[in-house]
Image (spheres, rainbow, N blue to C red):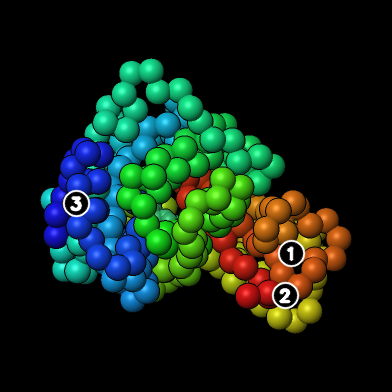
Amino acid sequence: MQTLHTIADFRRARGKVAGDLGLAPTMGFLHEGHLELVRRARAENDAVAVSIFVNPTQFGPAEDFKEYPRDLDRDLELLAKEGVALVFNPSPEEMYPPGHGTGIDTGPVSAPLEGSRRPGHFRGVATVVAKLFNIVQPNRAYFGQKDAQQVQVIKRMARDLDFPLEIVAVPTVREPDGLAMSSRNIYLDPRQRVAARCLYRGLTLAGERWAQGERDGGALRALVNETIEPEPLAAIDYVSVADVETLHELEGAAGPAALVSVAVRFGKVRLIDNVVLGGV
Ligand code: AMP
């Protein structure tokens, strides 16, 4: 496994890779969710590249860029065991030299949900992912369904800007009690960690109600709200029942599929999670 820190070095190493290359972009502090992307990429490509870059431009001024957990040595050990060929780990200065000013606006798909709570977030995400696609030149790129809106934003960008690659969404990997794995989970104190189960509980209940035939967006939203709200350590940011692709809120009867997503704060830690009901 080669670890490269500059764009020029990475391009040289990438040029020697034969066959299809899969890319898993990450911000590091890797867990089983990230490793699942890597395994899927390995299964579907001849070689795998992983980027580890905590991208400053996707964090708001009041967000946790500085506190975001980092452990490069441990990450590299994990990736070596997974048979990764190339790791790209640039500095912020390498990615954004003085004068950098171009940004990608992916339009309406980035407006609701995370986009409305985190202004500029998806411009930061789309721009860094476009740069990574140009640097890494993968045949396929792997993203977690855990960040459902991010998947739609990246698919939109790849279609709109004709990136010659396939975007693959990988199912969310969860802890045994259902909590979606996230690098931020380590910042939950023990009581918050127990309380955080309410996200998955709410999403699971929505799934059960859907299986019983409930299709009303408002009723499903209320059910998830009522499940999370009683938890005293949880502060709901949003509960959404939306169209899977456009992310428009579903008010009346949902179609064949719906994306139920939540953002909830536990103290300073903000967690997101989602399930897709029906459809896929
Ligand atoms: P991050 O390092 O948080 O930016 O995540 C990098 C990639 O891993 C993104 O595509 C995430 O959606 C994905 N990812 C993060 N957590 C999980 C999870 N629990 N299951 C599956 N994929 C995940």
Residue at the spot x=14%, y=54% of the render?
2
Q: Secondary structure at mark 2?
A: helix
Q: Amino acid at mark 3?
A: Ala
Q: Which quarter shows the C terminus? A: bottom right
Q: Residue 208: x, y in percent? A: 66, 77
Looking at the rendered image, the disc whose residue lies closer to the viewer, 3 or 1, is: 3
Mark 3 packing: few (<14 Cα in 10 Å), some, or many (20+)? some
Residue at the spot x=47%, y=37% of the render?
127
In the rendered image, is residue 45 in sight? Answer: yes
Q: Amino acid at mark 2?
A: Trp
**83 lies left or right of 64:** left
Residue carrying label 1: 220
Q: Which quarter shows the N terminus? A: bottom left
The label number, if any, that marks residue 13 in the structure image? 3
Q: CA distance from mark 2 to mark 1?
A: 8 Å
Mark 1 packing: few (<14 Cα in 10 Å), some, or many (20+)? many
Q: Residue placed farthest to the top in the image? A: 99
Image quarter for ligand 1 equals bottom left
Q: Amino acid at mark 1?
A: Leu
Pick whichever, 197 or 146, lies toward us: 146
Mark 2 packing: few (<14 Cα in 10 Å), some, or many (20+)? some
Residue at the spot x=32%, y=33% of the render?
95
**94 lies left or right of 103:** left
Q: Earlier in the sequence, mark 2 or mark 1?
A: 2
Pick whichever, 28 or 129, lies toward us: 129
Q: Residue 118: x, y in percent? A: 55, 35
Residue carrying label 2: 210
**Circle 2/circle 1 CB separation < 8 Å:** yes
